[in-house]
Image: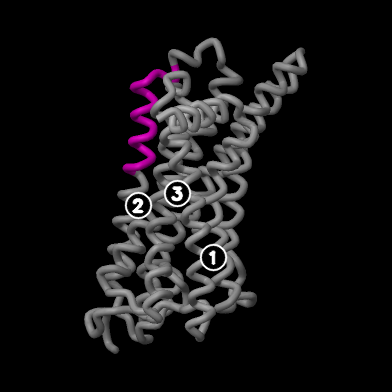
Amino acid sequence: MSNSSSFDEFLLLAFADTQELQLLHFSLFLGIYLAALLGNGLVITAVVGDHHLHTPMYFFLLNLSFLDLGSISTTVPKFMANSLRNTSAISYSGCAAQVFLVLFLLSAELSLLTVMAYDRFVAICRSLHYGTIMGSRACVRMAAAAWASGFIYSLLHTGNTFSLPLCQGNAVDQFFCEIPHILKLSCADSYLREAGLIVVSVFLVFGCFIFIVVSYVQIFRAVLRIPSEQGRHKAFSMCLPHLAVVSLFVSTTAFAYLKPPSISSPSLDLVVAVLYSVVPPTLNSLLYSMRNKELQEAVRKLFQLVQTQ
């Protein structure tokens, strides 16, 4: 196959060869997907419906839940449909759309997590000026910038990837269309076209990560200077969920894209892909609600309202 136009579909990697095991994987992923829908849906409904949660922190959490719903809905439903149909095919345009959406939502999520770290920094280290710095217009602009940066980055990355001639067939060794595995199908002399964009991506991700780390160093210094134990506990309860979400997202994504080629294998790549594309969108809402009494109270009121209907 001399170029990408010589075929009209890609073949994804199946989790199992037998129909029985594929149905088992379908059931497992269906449970995970429904849990992600329920958790993020509850967060979205609670934040929208409770005026006490109309604050910058919950506004950004609302955006995070939308991103999580989008990212898991981009990969898991197609995998479940293929498992039921006993096929591994995805159309060329569907693969391109999947790559674009995954990159868009994940990069926007990283930008949003960086913005959320800044929000926590201002709330704790610049508390007297919090209302001025994090006004409604400023929050909307920050969220819009996170979404827009993800869109532009994904558009450039996807366009560049699918403009490469593919000489190594159409079998993608992953359960969804992922750029590293598509690049393995490209011609050897065209791979360098993507290398520059990859280097820029690494610097951008590293910059966001450093900003988050520096923000939390300042936050923890400020928290430890709070005289009352109750005040320190409240400050930590505001920051620890976000820090847990950042740690889960960064660790799984970094391992997926930076692991040494020597330890790469189809089975390991599948596990790692599930860790960074399926697990964080499912657990993020749980991590935020575990220590957040305001969110728990809003969800409790929501259940009571449903029961009275």
Is residue 117 visible to us here? yes
Task: Tell me: residue 216, above or below residue 91.
Answer: above
Q: Mark 2 points at which residue?
A: 153
Q: Position of residue 66 (x, y in %)?
A: 40, 43
Q: Mark 3 points at which residue?
A: 37
Q: Mark 1 points at which residue?
A: 28
Which of the two discs, 1 and 3, labels the residue nearer the N terminus? 1
Q: In the figure, residue 198 lies in which quadrant? A: bottom left
Q: What residue is shown at x 54% (from left), y 65% (from top)? A: 28
**Front position in the image: 226 or 306:** 306
Q: Which of marks 2 and 1 is in front?
A: 1
Q: Is residue 236 left or right of residue 87?
A: right
Is residue 69 part of the magenta span, yes or no? no
Amino acid on which disc 2 is placed? Tyr
Q: How crowded is mark 2: few (under 14 residues within 10 Å), some or many (20 or more)?
A: some
Q: Most extreme residue toward the top, as rendered?
A: 128
Q: Residues within 10 Å of mark 1 (few under 14, many from 20)?
A: few
Q: In the figure, residue 44 lies in which quadrant? A: top left
Secondary structure at badge 1 equals helix
Q: How many labels does the image show?
A: 3
Q: Where is residue 39 in the image (x, y as percent from the top left)?
A: 50, 44
Q: What stretch is highlighted in magenta?
A: 133-148
Task: Tell me: residue 30, above or below residue 6.
Answer: above
Q: Position of residue 161 (x, y in %)?
A: 33, 68
